[in-house]
Image (tube, rainbow, N blue to C red):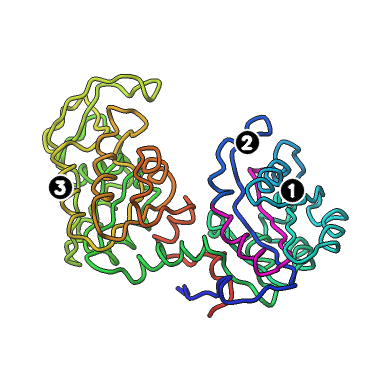
Amino acid sequence: MGLNKKSVDDINVAGKKVLCRCDFNVPLKEGKITDENRLVAALPTIKKLIADGGKVILCSHLGKPKGEPKPELSLAPVAERLSELLGQDVKFAADNEVVGPNAKAAVEAMKDGDVILLENTRYRKEETKNGEEFSKDLASLCDVFVNDAFGTAHRAHCSNVGVAQLVDTAVVGYLMQKEIDFLGNAVENPVRPFVAILGGAKVADKLNVIDNLLEKCDTLIIGGGMAYTFLKAQGNEIGTSLVDDSKVDYCKEMIAKAEKLGKKLLLPTDAVTIKDFPNPIDAPVETEVYDSTAMPADRQGCDIGPKTQELFADAVKSAKTVVWNGPMGVFENPTLAEGTIAVAKALAETDATTIIGGGDSAAAVNTLGFGEKMSHISTGGGASLEFLEGKELPGVAAANDK
């Protein structure tokens, strides 16, 4: 996997028109941005391009307008908020065809260090199909392309892959660089011992991740709902716990693979069980803890128990690299969040490089207040999973090699 990519630090954009693909896919409520983390995360790359005297043309998708203009998914509010965050005017090019008369005129009038923002790239139906016409439109605006949107790096779209192939200079921004450095290199070239922790509900979502990480890591820890299919594969009674019966044989294969490769595969030794799934999800629940080998037939496991918490935390103590993707239980419920908290705490207390692979684990770590203590929290859900699968990401591959 080619991970040695040119970044914004390897080029000079003075006086050049720079198209920068960001991830401004922020939640909006009545035209107001309710979480601006993604905007803040994009600032270092944007500021670098401004400081170098580039003419900075920003683009991003927002939601799923499915190839037609949807006013409620316009990026206009983003331009307004970015102006405030950058302390300079970010001019919004309101074109339903994205690269239209407004965008062209705005780019023509730019001075070095100016910033404009294009309309939602998914207003164009070619975007998600990587259609040539839209890629050419985007390329016609710029001399240099910078991709800083890791969240869409696993998709080959016009605004991250198509345009990169039509521009001579295509590099990655600081956010992408950080993802490649941490997530990509952790899997391809980890400092050992390397411990991987996987959770979440379904084995099916993580088939290739489990398979790939078993080859790369020294210890693989499995928690969350997916652990019960593994426990069943070992012949245990798992009560009414979540199970994927079509994947029991796959779990047997993975247990055998771990043994064959001499890898440690750690499964929960005890479970926090409940009678009925909470409704709403954060409603109070009555819990009882049972060993994984002695679960009652009428109860379901919804978190790892205290013995498992200790087992998993111990495994992290001697690690040099830890990657974690997926919660250990129904962490949206305070009573069933203890396992996830215990793992987050173990990661916060270790000197190892700790990498949180996007999605629910990123949300859990941030919600629980451990964000500052992690080496890296990935900004992409699907993209970070594909990185952990060892797949080449089109959005990374499209950038120029060093």
Residue receiving disc 3: 311
How packed mark 1 is, by other alpha carbons closer than 10 Å (few <14, some 14-19, many 20 or more), is many
How packed mark 2 is, by other alpha carbons closer than 10 Å (few <14, some 14-19, many 20 or more), is some
Residue receiving disc 2: 28
Q: Which residues are magenta?
A: 41-64
* Residue at the spot 60% in from the left edge and 46% down from the top edge: 25
Q: Nearer the viewer, mark 2 or mark 3?
A: 2
Element marked by disc 1? helix
Of pointers 1 and 3, the one earlier in the residue sequence: 1
Residue nearest the viewer, comparing 117 with 133: 117
Residue 107 pos. (x, y %) = 81, 61
Residue nearest the viewer, comparing 35 with 180: 35
* Residue at the spot 31% in from the left edge and 68% down from the top edge: 190
Q: Are marks 2 and 1 in contact (CB under 8 Å)?
A: no
Element marked by disc 3? helix
Of pointers 2 and 1, the one earlier in the residue sequence: 2
Left or right: residue 322 versus residue 116 is: left
Which mark identifies residue 123?
Answer: 1
**Image quadrant in which you'd find residue 186:** bottom left
Q: Is residue 88 above or below residue 387?
A: above
Q: Amino acid at mark 2?
A: Leu
